[in-house]
Image (cartoon, coloured by chain):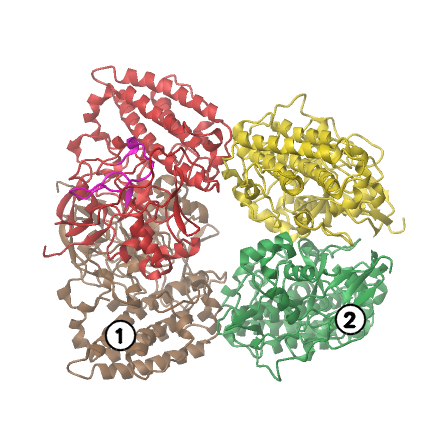
Chain colours: A green, B brown, C red, D yellow
Amino acid sequence: MSESHQEGDNHREQALAQAFRQVRAASMRFCEPLAIEDYGLQAVAETSPVKWHLAHTSWFFETFILKPLMSGYQAFDERFEYLFNSYYNGVGAQFPRAQRSLLSRPTVEQVLAYRDHVDTHMVRLLEDSTSTETPTPEQARVVQRCVLGLHHEQQHQELMHTDLKFNLACNPLFPEYRPLRGRWLEPAAAALAWHDFEGGITGIGMNESDSLFCFDNETPHHRVLLEPFQLASRLSTNAEFLAFVDAGGYQQPQWWLSDGWARVQQDNWQHPLYWHKRDGQWFEFTLYGLQPLDPSRPVSHISAYEADAFARWSDARLPTEFEWESVARQHPVTGQFLDSDHLHPRSADPANGPAQMHGALWQWTSSSYAPYPGYQPADGALGEYNGKFMCNQLVLRGGSCVSERQHVRSTYRNFFYPGDRWQFSGVRLARNGRRDA
Amino acid sequence: MSESHQEGDNHREQALAQAFRQVRAASMRFCEPLAIEDYGLQAVAETSPVKWHLAHTSWFFETFILKPLMSGYQAFDERFEYLFNSYYNGVGAQFPRAQRSLLSRPTVEQVLAYRDHVDTHMVRLLEDSTSTETPTPEQARVVQRCVLGLHHEQQHQELMHTDLKFNLACNPLFPEYRPLRGRWLEPAAAALAWHDFEGGITGIGMNESDSLFCFDNETPHHRVLLEPFQLASRLSTNAEFLAFVDAGGYQQPQWWLSDGWARVQQDNWQHPLYWHKRDGQWFEFTLYGLQPLDPSRPVSHISAYEADAFARWSDARLPTEFEWESVARQHPVTGQFLDSDHLHPRSADPANGPAQMHGALWQWTSSSYAPYPGYQPADGALGEYNGKFMCNQLVLRGGSCVSERQHVRSTYRNFFYPGDRWQFSGVRLARNGRRDA
Amino acid sequence: MSESHQEGDNHREQALAQAFRQVRAASMRFCEPLAIEDYGLQAVAETSPVKWHLAHTSWFFETFILKPLMSGYQAFDERFEYLFNSYYNGVGAQFPRAQRSLLSRPTVEQVLAYRDHVDTHMVRLLEDSTSTETPTPEQARVVQRCVLGLHHEQQHQELMHTDLKFNLACNPLFPEYRPLRGRWLEPAAAALAWHDFEGGITGIGMNESDSLFCFDNETPHHRVLLEPFQLASRLSTNAEFLAFVDAGGYQQPQWWLSDGWARVQQDNWQHPLYWHKRDGQWFEFTLYGLQPLDPSRPVSHISAYEADAFARWSDARLPTEFEWESVARQHPVTGQFLDSDHLHPRSADPANGPAQMHGALWQWTSSSYAPYPGYQPADGALGEYNGKFMCNQLVLRGGSCVSERQHVRSTYRNFFYPGDRWQFSGVRLARNGRRDA
Amino acid sequence: MSESHQEGDNHREQALAQAFRQVRAASMRFCEPLAIEDYGLQAVAETSPVKWHLAHTSWFFETFILKPLMSGYQAFDERFEYLFNSYYNGVGAQFPRAQRSLLSRPTVEQVLAYRDHVDTHMVRLLEDSTSTETPTPEQARVVQRCVLGLHHEQQHQELMHTDLKFNLACNPLFPEYRPLRGRWLEPAAAALAWHDFEGGITGIGMNESDSLFCFDNETPHHRVLLEPFQLASRLSTNAEFLAFVDAGGYQQPQWWLSDGWARVQQDNWQHPLYWHKRDGQWFEFTLYGLQPLDPSRPVSHISAYEADAFARWSDARLPTEFEWESVARQHPVTGQFLDSDHLHPRSADPANGPAQMHGALWQWTSSSYAPYPGYQPADGALGEYNGKFMCNQLVLRGGSCVSERQHVRSTYRNFFYPGDRWQFSGVRLARNGRRDA
């Protein structure tokens, strides 16, 4: 969290307790369709159980706010410090990530009691901290960390969708998270077109004068020099990706990065993560269960390796995160977010500029997740939030249909390993522009 | 199941429906202390979730009795044939064993409905099948397979204890399965003494004229020739095993089989599976949570490698299964079984003959699990029950404190890999006798 | 080594130095066709480099005889104690088995100098030790350990063949160890017939009065009780095994032990280790390079899992080691050994009794490698020779075409894991006899 | 290879046959100290045997020049196309990398004959191709590919040093590649100082008008915008890195990237790759065998994770490849290269500008290996030379003491995975400059 950017949030502070309640309630709303048995699922180390997400997000408030900043606070259960620490070495050791499904205790009921305990104390502390004209440094820190904690919880709300989807998909019964309302098949997507951009020197990252919340990895604002480039008018569709599959793309090494091809071989990838072929027909596993593959919707749940190979086969490439941001900041943050209440990316609306810049699917870029020049993580354990992951991962941009709208910005940098497929990730093509343009 | 041994069970047939109800109810009684979250735990491939055990034992009746032998039977859910098949290739493909914890659906409630469905039809079929003086061959098969299914379910009742214990033990909160009633520490065990046996030709296995149920691997009855030997008067205790630990036994290769020593190194074994040292004191995880290590109780949850190394260090050896059986059949099947309602092995009572021959703990033998001369598995998928496991495993004898008393016999052959530790397994020492005795 | 059996070797002692020279020379003769590059090959941990075998067998004499029993002996290089120790924890730590191919130094030339150094001192010591009428205990120990060391070297001579074969087979050029002389295809094998045996009480193991060398695992002599059985008249042939392959045997779980089927799946076994299909024709890799599969020769280089599955498919089973020995001791130790100078098993001669009881191929038995009743390994590090491997392995009997004739006895127990395939191992079928016969 | 940059090499073309002979001879000169046994070593998949390098570099000329461009050329052995293909899918399948040590055949002698065969034909073809005033397109291609092949061989000459060093280091005898001449300990290094740089727009990559050879990954020339920064005056030394080790750096997660810390834990890293502690003294394995750790020499054989953690502990960071290049192009390419004939990095000379910008050790940058804007790999299989590796790797700059001087440029981009340690890799620190400077 970039602390210097928080001052402009003053007008929101009075409402912080209310925001706190809303965000926390959203996590519980996610759980409504679940059976108790669903809370504990964890198919691989990366996909944590819902119950763990519920506890860990509470742990974040307890560890970074209630324990250090609320006098007289009594921990709900001291053993949770270890159980629900994700990766903060500065706090202490962590229960092994891959074994989170083994924690049948505390039960869901006990974790909900833990949430209640944290919520009660947080609301009391927030009301104290925002009641005065001139907050003390401690009070200011409560506010700043609370804002960070809410964004942290929104990240985990998205992960609850992606992790649960992956975990349910391992069940051959293909259970739905909740029933689909309305019809599945979308109207046809507009033909893909190319938009030209001049490049040149462009500002990247959160500007300090913007006075909005952002994560530390979006700072400092700085300038980069771009060559001319072109960007596709929308995300690539299932129909377009199916052509790559049908052309034998997964059997032809020439389209693939070396590490990508090794992965294709090792894990026998033949198509995107959730595609299934039955009796010659393609289906896709969704949070609405197994559905026919919709040719108009954007292809989703692909790794960067697949996005890159598809781009090469398409005589194109992935955009850099700087190219992407230079375009995205010209557009408002509109699109298909979680409030659209449809948990799968819809087909693109025809639009003037490039469509689907925000929402629908996270868009792989070719940019390695690296610190911006002059980047400084926070002191202490909170400094482990972002910086230590700046290696081996690629940046994704734009948010998805399971992201909260208020959580996404044009400067927002998401990051995953190039082989990761369980996020709502898709591909927007780019090309080099003409130098003499 | 040895079908030819079933005739003598006729007198029990009228009561079979009642036995069916009792055994099935025992599985449900096991579940009473559980939270819903506990039903799905699976820490390693070997330790199946309780829910899976509940479903699989029902699947056994449905697959081998209701579907082939009850006309007009409608399966509860055809997809369960695949989901809850354990290892019967003759029935079809199996859902991967290591992923059973990923089946949040069917829920516990749905699995209980499945059990009800199977129970209702089984009771109806049993009443039909046992109502006539002279059963048809089909009716006789229903009876025979039902008896087998009940013994199968009793095996799984034991596994529910051992698997749940292992799975709960992975939780650093060390949850108890149920609270301990009474005091933990036992009276001191009697000093270990040796009993002499002459050897000679002895009958092994179930005699056809005994007309009792047994598994096919206990047949045919045959003779073996034994050399003179000695058998310890009771199981070895925690105090005795602790002396081995304290003497550096886990650091000294000379006591260990080559494969055992490799395992000690690879998995960094330093003591029995459930022992924990805290602040210089030894504790043991039990179904009653973490308890002080009781020196008087038998050492439990050790592998055959540990049992063998301890025996060698003790200037003794493991008995063969034939030595064991030749002694055990001189004794009634008495001892600490599940009906004692204490879920941890108690210390040995002083006794005339060797104590603890049955109950308390399964006793590792040095005998590889192999077919008896003339052994014939059943035809069809049921023939996969035992025979295909006759390689790489060792025989354990005697039953344990989580075995049903009626389930255990002196001829009963249990079998696990020599490195397995999650069963209620212990060690009884043996020695060579004098040849001139 | 069973020390008490050595007295009868007295008449051989005068000739021991000569025997020493002959056995040591045989190891060098094996190397004649090799390029320097071949000496270092090690494809898997189990298949040691030839150079390592040459050094380790010298290490055995140096470690167990020269260092402890020859006064004033100077080690060739003290660092070799660690480098060339195979598995004797009593001697000290061992260089990791899987990394033996990384020892480019010492070079082949240096290892041969090491052998010369050991040989010179051994011959001198042997001449001293056998020169007196009444040897001192130390001299007797030199003689006993030297006899053991020579049998140890003969075991490694066989392993040099099997290991080199495996290692060369990894080269897609399929290099031959040496050229084939004579024609490849053998005359047709006689039809398989069955020989009946009564069973009853039979003596097993080396009799103390036989006063011949044997390994400790062949003792003590004891009696076992056998049921009636039948034994096949010869080893099973490639033609017979090919029928199993063609019938889909490797795709049908019903023939396989559970662990065997898991291995078939995991390693994608489709046929015996060295078989290759090219343009619809079967070939077999041999020490003479790639050769057409000869239908008349015995099937070789199969695991016990394959032998067992083939036996089950053939409505037969593997013999126990006791059944095998009870028959073999009725026959002289004749057959195709290394002195036949043909490094692949030949087809069976018609014979009165069962043919190929010795030589040609090691024959898998169904018997787990276990200690005989009363078995006692030697004291000290030499006690690690055999006993610590008595778990998880199966016994093979009879010797092979790459065994030295003098090395093999009817009581000889070879042992490998049931999944091992790189030995010259084959299958002889057995069946239960009629009880009333 | 950037074909458009080759025209300026015309004046070198007459001398190309001579350059060919020289480069090829250098590979053979490397082998002079080797025993035949050393040629086949391969401890891990990454470190190929010397023999394989000798064959593969010949394969490169045969595959990309002789076979397609010399009429009537007869391959030395058609089977080598598969055996010695490294990773060119466009050429065909490849013998598995991890198994190269298993190719005892072809022998060293046969590989040298292969080299002779290729050399003879290459020289003949080169003389034909450079004899005319105006080369045909085919002749021009021979020249271009030959230049590429020579740079390719120089890369492998460096790898022969790094791979052999790793492979020899696995031998507990610590064999030297060749004896050290002169004294080992270097004069003390000058104190580390900082040089300031303004940043701004700078040109990166090979300029087309420079008309020198470069690899395709150094093109196209383009501009980047740099913030002010500081660069250390020399590489960091063993003494400086030892302070990090002694301060507990390998035990403190706060200095490490998340993936780096995971690697430290998994592989139990405690110090740089070749350091050994014996009786309280530090030693380092070198191509001259085990030597005392010299405090003045640069720390070498560290991963990017270690370089990055050390930098963070030093309150500094790694430079980007753009920062590095912007400074390096101000300096001539001087330093300790292979022609210095000392195979370990020496301590830094005092210098005006930053010392050791070239030579001594490859310097890790924080830049992911990514395509420059507008990058285009060559068509066909040669296009697999560089581009397909542009993921998951980091760029190293500057060359090392085992690089050929003519092979290194300020624009040269080397690349390895951040966890790789077997290269001659070190660390030069950087810091952010003052923005108002």
Visible residue check, residue A131: no
Task: Say above or below: C316 vs B48.
Answer: above
In magenta stretch: residue C356: yes
Between A411 and C261, the one lying in front of the other is C261
Residue drawn 61% across the image and 30% down it: D116
Q: Which residues are magenta?
A: C336-363
Badge 2 vs badge 1, beta-carbon distance below 8 Å: no
C199 sits left or right of A390 in the view: left
Report the residue marked by disc 1. Answer: B146
In magenta stretch: residue D28: no
Task: Say above or below: A351 vs C436.
Answer: below
Q: Amino acid at mark 1?
A: Cys
Which label is found at residue A354? 2
Dots 2 and 1 on the same chain: no
Magenta stretch: helix, strand or loop mostly: loop
Which quarter of the picture shows residue D421?
Answer: top right
B189 sits left or right of B282 in the view: left
Farthest residue toward the right? D436
Residue drawn 64% across the image and 27% down it: D29
Percent of width and height locating residue C249: 34, 58
Q: Secondary structure at mark 2?
A: loop
* Cα distance between the residues tagged 2 and 1: 68 Å
Badge 2 density bin: few <14, some 14–19, many ≥20, Cα 10 Å: many
Q: Chain of mark 1?
A: B
Between C181 and C20, the one lying in front of the other is C181
Farthest residue toward the left? C436
Q: Chain of mark 2?
A: A
